[in-house]
Image: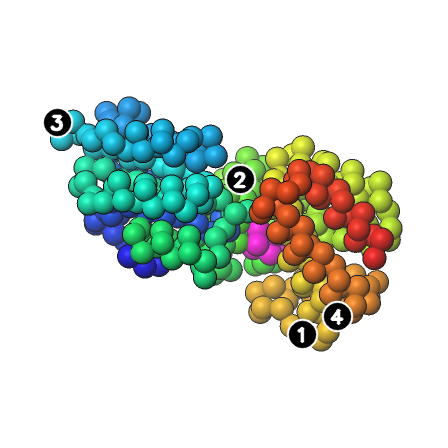
């Protein structure tokens, strides 16, 4: 069926136009999860939502069991929604059998396959081509700076708060397009400030200081200074606060790419140039070769995590130690 945008998905669902088979993937797990719930809520009557919305995990569900579930058709005009996470975990032959089973489609049933960010598919590979040919495929990217600003403004308006330009620029940079983080951090700010007040940069630094983008900057600083114990302790704290290993790896990778760009005289995107001064100071502590090696090492660890060859927490600790060794 091809690749669609999140905007197209939203527009179609709003108009009541549903596909029988969807495949959601991308780097934003929060948006994927919300989209699955949104489709189910819009398709199923309220009384059927709790009984006819089935969530399955391909890593824990045998293909034969999934097919048995999908073989039971809705009765008496009822509707069904099946959400199958980690669909890429099945073998190619199993995937073919599942797709064949649900073709032709049933207008009273929707099946949604998803893949988490850390296992996002290669669009050139057979799995992606096979699934996207059968399903309405939607990629969930991180929000752009404009989209992030728009979402911040909408949420602040609902709680009666304003934000000065400096604070908005800082928050957009810290969120780095993460929709889940946006929801969480705006809720924290809403609880911190009273309706009618204005959020300042100091408020952002006070309330949002635990977020990955800022602490990863601190982590890179600790790595550059060789402060091993502090760096490992910072990772442990971030994980304890709820950060996922894959999200931390994403931010570490992005940070070192930024350091390399600044080191080699390149500019960041316009909306992120406020970061350049601090990055330039930090980049001075590395050689160009060291930064290039760091980016390659981070990419290697990312591949290890995608193929589940090592424990995520252990992989992060080993990454820090290897970065310091280099």
Q: Could you give the CA–CA distance between mark 4 and mark 3, rounded to whole angstroms? A: 65 Å
Residue contact between numbered discs 1 and 3, judged by CB atoms under 8 Å: no
Q: Could you give the CA–CA distance between mark 4 and mark 1, rounded to whole angstroms? A: 8 Å
The region drawn magenta spans: 170-176
Of residue 86 and residue 266, the one placed in the foreground of this image is: 86
Residue named by callout 1: 266
Which residue reaches farthest left? 76
| Spot occupied by residue 261 in the image (x, y as percentages of width and height) | 68, 69
Q: Could you give the CA–CA distance between mark 1 and mark 2, rounded to whole angstroms? A: 33 Å
> Dot 3: what SS?
loop
At 48% from the left and 53% from the top, the residue drawn is 121
First-in-chain label (1 vs 3): 3
> Residue 210's image quarter?
top right
Residue contact between numbered discs 4 and 2, judged by CB atoms under 8 Å: no
Of residue 155 and residue 84, the one placed in the foreground of this image is: 84
Residue named by callout 2: 184
| Spot occupied by residue 307 in the image (x, y as percentages of width and height) | 58, 46
| Spot occupied by residue 44 in the image (x, y as percentages of width and height) | 24, 34
Of residue 184 and residue 88, the one placed in the foreground of this image is: 88
Q: Is 190 placed left or right of 34 in the picture?
A: right
> Dot 4: what SS?
helix
Residue 76, numbered circle: 3
First-in-chain label (4 vs 2): 2
Question: Disc 4 or disc 3, which is closer to the eye?
Answer: 3
């Amino acid at each position: 069926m091809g690749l669609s945008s999140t905007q197209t998905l939203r527009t179609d669902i709003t108009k009541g136009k549903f596909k029988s088979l969807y495949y959601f993937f991308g780097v934003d797990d929060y948006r994927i999860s919300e989209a699955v719930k949104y489709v189910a809520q819009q398709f199923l009557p309220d009384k059927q939502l709790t009984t006819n919305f089935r969530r399955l995990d391909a890593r824990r569900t045998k293909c034969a069991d999934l097919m048995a579930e999908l073989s039971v058709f809705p009765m008496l005009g009822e509707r069904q929604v099946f959400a199958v996470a980690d669909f890429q975990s099945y073998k190619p032959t199993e995937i073919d059998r599942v797709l064949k089973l649900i073709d032709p489609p049933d207008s009273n049933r929707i099946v949604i396959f998803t893949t988490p960010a850390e296992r996002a598919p290669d669009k050139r590979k057979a799995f992606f081509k096979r699934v996207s040919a059968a399903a309405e495929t939607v990629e969930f990217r991180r929000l752009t700076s404009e989209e992030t600003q728009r979402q911040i403004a909408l949420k602040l308006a609902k709680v009666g708060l304003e934000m000065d330009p400096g604070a908005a620029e800082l928050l957009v940079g810290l969120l780095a397009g993460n929709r889940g983080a946006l929801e969480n951090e705006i809720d924290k700010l809403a609880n911190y400030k009273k309706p009618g007040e204005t959020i300042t940069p100091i408020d952002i630094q006070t309330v949002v200081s635990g977020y990955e983008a800022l602490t990863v900057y601190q982590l890179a600083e600790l790595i550059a200074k060789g402060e091993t114990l502090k760096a490992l302790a910072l990772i442990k704290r971030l994980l304890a606060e709820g950060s996922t290993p894959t999200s931390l790896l994403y931010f570490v990778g992005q940070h070192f790419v930024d350091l390399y760009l600044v080191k080699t005289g390149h500019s960041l995107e316009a909306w992120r140039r406020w970061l350049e001064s601090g990055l330039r100071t930090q980049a001075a502590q590395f050689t160009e070769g060291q930064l290039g090696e760091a980016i390659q090492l981070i990419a290697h660890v990312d591949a290890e995590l995608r193929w589940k060859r090592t424990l995520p927490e252990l992989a992060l600790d080993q990454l820090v130690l290897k970065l310091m060794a280099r």
